[in-house]
Amino acid sequence: MTAQLNPRGDVAVLVPAAGAGVRLGPGRPKALRLLAGEPLLVHAVRRLAAAASVHTIVVAAPIAEVAAVRELLAPIAPVTVVPGGAERQESVAAALAAVPVGPDIVLVHDAARALTPPALVESVAAAVRSGHDAVIPVLPVVDTIKEVDADELVLGTVDRRALRAVQTPQGFRRSVLAAAHAAAGDALTDDAGLVEKQGVPVFCVPGSDHALKITRPFDLALAEHLLATGLRTRTLNS
Ligand code: CTP
Ligand code: MG
């Protein structure tokens, strides 16, 4: 059944999904790789469509797969599909350009974070709505972090209490994200980084273990396990 998006919602979600998935190993583009029998992108879009504030979803697909992705997502939710670019930032820019007049909040969400709970989408959107122009979901860093030189010699230990691992969806006041992309220079892996360069304060909200990014085969195996156990594995940060 196709989910209905909320016509009175104030959130557009951009879903960069045009990457190859090199680190996952040989195969189809990552967004189309199967997790429990369905493409990662289907899992991701289904959860986005279940978030009550979402008005619009724009997916940036691999250029050769635009028609296939449209067909794949049609039964899931009404989405706009555009061709992505060679870098993630270009894919996000292409999706941003396709957002219709209306939504004032724009979230950017990796298709690779396929199990992200709708509640996280809502909490990021709520933080933007409450007045933060840029919002990122974060988790504390659990490992000890060392800085090393080119020869793998340790230069020092970083105080991890001041570090955060950053997830998506990242949320922005629409005008703030549009200005950051218009001014963008070097390609960055996250959109908050572009906004930081504009001097805009970026606010952190608690992330979710279930919003893990599926990058390597291990992550895919973990995601399969989480789905098989009904996503019951919770921690303080879930
Ligand atoms: N992405 C994109 N366009 C690109 C590169 C990446 O839309 N040119 C998307 C990916 O599809 C993914 C998200 O950005 O949903 C995060 O990127 P990453 O996890 O690095 O995915 P890939 O680039 O596909 O993986 P890899 O770097 O291993 O090739
Ligand atoms: Mg990549």
Image (cartoon, rainbow, N blue to C red):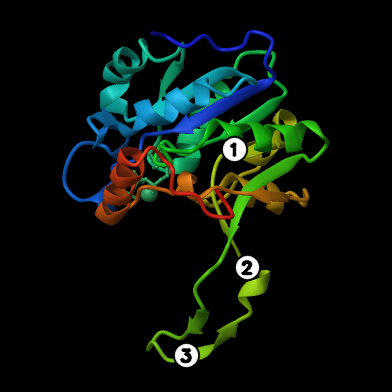
- Mark sitting on residue 154: 3
Q: Where residue 212 sits in the image (x, y, percent)? A: 44, 49
- Dot label at residue 177: none
Q: Amino acid at mark 3?
A: Val
Is residue 80 rendered to the left or right of residue 237?
left
* Residues under numbered marks 2 and 1 in contact, where contact means CB atoms less than 8 Å apart: no
In the rendered structure, which amino acid carries the disc numbered 1?
A: Leu
Mark sitting on residue 163: 2
Name which residue lies at 42% across and 19% down: 81
Task: Measure the C-alpha gap from mark 2 to mark 1.
Answer: 20 Å
Q: Please state the quadrant of the image where ligand 1 appears.
A: top left
Front label number (3 vs 1):
1
Quadrant for the N terminus in the image? top left
Q: Position of residue 45 (x, y in %)?
A: 44, 25
Which residue is the site of mark 1?
120
Give, as a three-letter code, the residue at label 2. Leu
